[in-house]
Each structure stands twice: as C-alpha cells, then as structure tokens.
Amino acid sequence: MKLSLTRNRWIVRFLGFLFAFLLLVVLITAPGALAADYNGTGKEVILQGFHWTSYKPENNGNKHWYQIVKENAQNINRAGFDYVWFPPPSRSAASDNSYLPTEWYTLENGYGTENELKEAVTALKPTLALADIVINHRCGTATGGADFTNPAFGNSEQNRSAVVTGDDCNCGTGKPEERHHNGSISESNDAGRDLDHTNPLVQAKVKEFLDKLKTEIGFAGWRYDQVRGYNGYYVGLYNDASKPVLSVGEFWDDNSQAVVDWVDETRGKSMAFDFPTRAALVDATLNQNYSRLKTISGKSPGVIGMWPEMSVTFIENHDTEAVRNGGQKRFPDDKVMQGYVYILTHPGIPTVFWRHFFDGGDSQKAQIVKLIEIRKNAGITSKSSVFIEPNTDGKYAAIVDGKVAIKIGSASWSPGDGWKVALDGPDYAVWTKS
C-alpha cells in the first residue's frame, strides 16, 4: 500500500509538471505571446516627426530638420505625445529623404548631423524616439552596387552574397527573394540592392546597427520600412536582439488579412501600420460611405477589427501626402479632423502627422491636443472595446469603452443622457461621461 501511494504521488506530480510545461509552450508559441515588450503599453500616441520635404533646409528657415524637432520638443511634450518617429538616420545615395541608405554607420544626411540628431532625441525626453529602419535595401558606397562600406558585410565576395540573386544590379549571389507565409513573393526595390536576410552576415550587421542607434543615439524603438520586401521572421529576430520598447512595420496593403499575416510572421513581435483602416476612413469621409467603418459582423474594419493591439493607426504620412504623390492618395483636407476624431478615440496606437499638427493652424492643433487629452483621461488603449451604432446613414457613431462617444458625418446623433460634449466641429463631435 505504501509503495502504491508513493507511486501515485509521483504520477500526480509528473502529470502536474507535464501540464505546466505544455501550458508554457502554448503561451510562448501563441501569436503575440512575446509581443508585450516590443509593442509598448497600448496607451501611447505617436507623432510622425517629419514629412516628405523635411530634409530641405530652404523649407525650414535654412535650418537642419533635427534642429526644428529640438526647438519644438517642449510643444511635443506638452501635447501628450509619447513617441516621435524620426526619419532614416543614415547617409543616403541621394540628397533626399534617406530612403536609399549607403553607409549605415554614418549618421549624417539631409536632416542634419549626428550631433544634431543626438540633441533632438535628448531634448524630447521623456518623449521617446523611434528610428526609421531601412534594411530591405541598401546602395553601395561608390557605385550603388554591392560595394558596401561602413559597415561592409565582409570582403567583396561577401558583400555580393548579401544581395539576393535576381536583384536588378545582377551583382547578388545570395538566396532569391523569399516568399511570405501567405505565398506572396517579397517586394523588391529597384533603386537599391535587396538584401538577403537569410545571410548571417546581414543579420549580424543589422543587429550591430540597431545597437548603435540605441546605445549611442538614444533611440528607444523602430519603424521598419518596406517590410513587404523580406519575411517578418527577421523583424522578430532583430527585435529579440535589440529589445525596442515599440516596433511597427510598414506593410503597405489595404487587405487586413495580409497585414495580420505579416504580424504573424514576426511571431507577434512587431505591430503594423493599419493601412486598411486608413483606406476605410478615406472612403467613408470622402464619399460619405460610413458603412465602410463597420463590418457585417458589426466590428471595426482594418487591423483594429482583427488584432487591435497590433495596429498602429494613421490618416497621413510622408508617402501619402500630396507633395509626394500629387494628391492621388492623400486624406481629404476638409476631413482631417474627422479622421483624427476616429483614430484618437479608437483602438490601436494612433499616429499624428507632423504637417497636420504643426502646419494645420492653431485651431486644428488645439483640437488634436484635446483629443489626446480625452483619450488619455478616458484610459482608451489599443485594446479598447467599440460599440458601433448600427445605422450608418449619413454618419458613423460609436461608443468606446463606455466612456467616450463619437460621431462623424452630417447626420445628427446623440449618445443620450449622461453625456456632455467635449469637442465638436464641422460634421464631427465627441462626448464624454458627464
């Protein structure tokens, strides 16, 4: 009898240990399980700290852009922004926006010097800085080919092996472009050499680059450029090495499932810009098609309706603004505040565009500041719940977390008794609990 009881105790202990182990495996491997460290707290608001022509001193009173950011640091802090997204920091193949980087380690370009960059990042504190990381492609130092320096990936042969086979330069000896998990081929960049992220030499230098930006400049997180160009697994790999407080990728696609698939590729270790939500907002406000803001199941469209804590929302950025694309993809000027009423009261982490905040006039700036205040006072986060009014005729109306109500569109609507108007304007209103 004693032997039987002892054996039973060991069986129970073993089964308990096995259950705990299996539970741990499930938690670790579940999508987003390791994501918390790299995706902020969900309470943040981001400012995109530049626009398409920021690199031109003639537009900035003959000052470098980093000086402009530094001079506005207190205004940015007072407005309630938690992060400022900086432009790419490295030397570029052209005197432009630095999206064709050459020498990663030379932190000087049209936006300013390395010292000016450090000063801007320091001046913003406690607001944190996010660096724009362009590692899908890179140009050679002298030729635009594979003659990489500062850092090199090794000797000339190793430099060529860092470029995918099939690149436009015909100089790459690395592996061909990878496919994403949904089967689509990675996106190439004709102007730069597409890097082979399966190559350990590339991985090592990317990790060193991120470490340099973090330890020497003070960057706290990353915005990854053109992540359609390589598998999201590597973003997760680089985040594991660099430990950003926040990571977001530019997977430019209006299909919500495609964006969520990329987040899955990172193993939930990076958020993504919510292009599908922006597309729905443009259609809704431009064409008064407010049904675009509610799915058949009554949820929000876009990534915020599928995986809200992995969504970074926005209504405009340097790529979509008029000066970049002739106005073909821009957000309607007279609907800008409707867009901010939506993203600053809804799930996801919202991003405000520099031009909208600093160049849209004092009234618009004050209203954006008020919306940030409303969001933070109500405790709205990336995971907040949304009840959407079923009738979308001439309007979109919703109540978020039972604390904030909004309406955009010309039709009248009220959340009822117990609410007070906190903000209103042409075809929009926001209420809070009275």
Image (cartoon, rainbow, N blue to C red):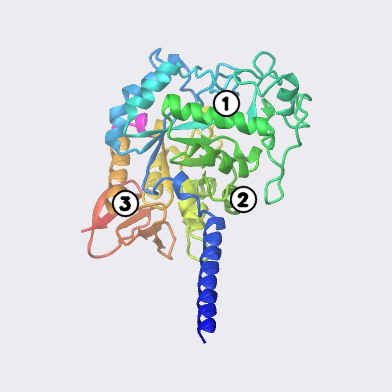
Which secondary structure, mark 2?
Answer: helix
Q: CA distance from mark 1 to mark 2?
A: 24 Å
Assess whether mark 3 and mark 2 are in contact (beta carbons under 8 angstroms).
no
Q: Is residue 408 above or below residue 418?
A: above
Query: Regarding mark 3 in the picture, which secondary structure is present there?
Result: strand
Q: Foreground mark, 1 or 3?
A: 1
* Residue lying furthest left: 434
Is the residue marked by circle 1 packed among few (<14), some (14-19), or many (20+) residues within 10 Å? Answer: many
Query: Going by the image, does 195 lie left or right of 304?
Result: right
Q: CA distance from mark 2 to mark 3?
A: 33 Å
* Residue 177 within the magenta-colored segment of the rendering: no
Residue 123: mark? none
Compared across the picture, whether 263 is left or right of 431 comes to right
Magenta highlight range: 357-363
The amino acid on which the numbered mark 1 sits, given as a three-letter code, is Tyr
Say whether residue 270 is left or right of residue 336: right
In the rendered image, which residue does mark 2 sit on? 258
Work out how far the residue at label 1 is from the one at label 3, CA to CA, in angstroms.
39 Å
Cβ–Cβ below 8 Å for labels 1 and 3? no
Q: Give x and y (percent) for residue 38.
A: 47, 44
Type of the residue with mark 2 = Ala
Instruction: Give the labeled residue for mark 1.
Output: 99
Question: Horizontal and vertical percent for residue 407?
Answer: 36, 55
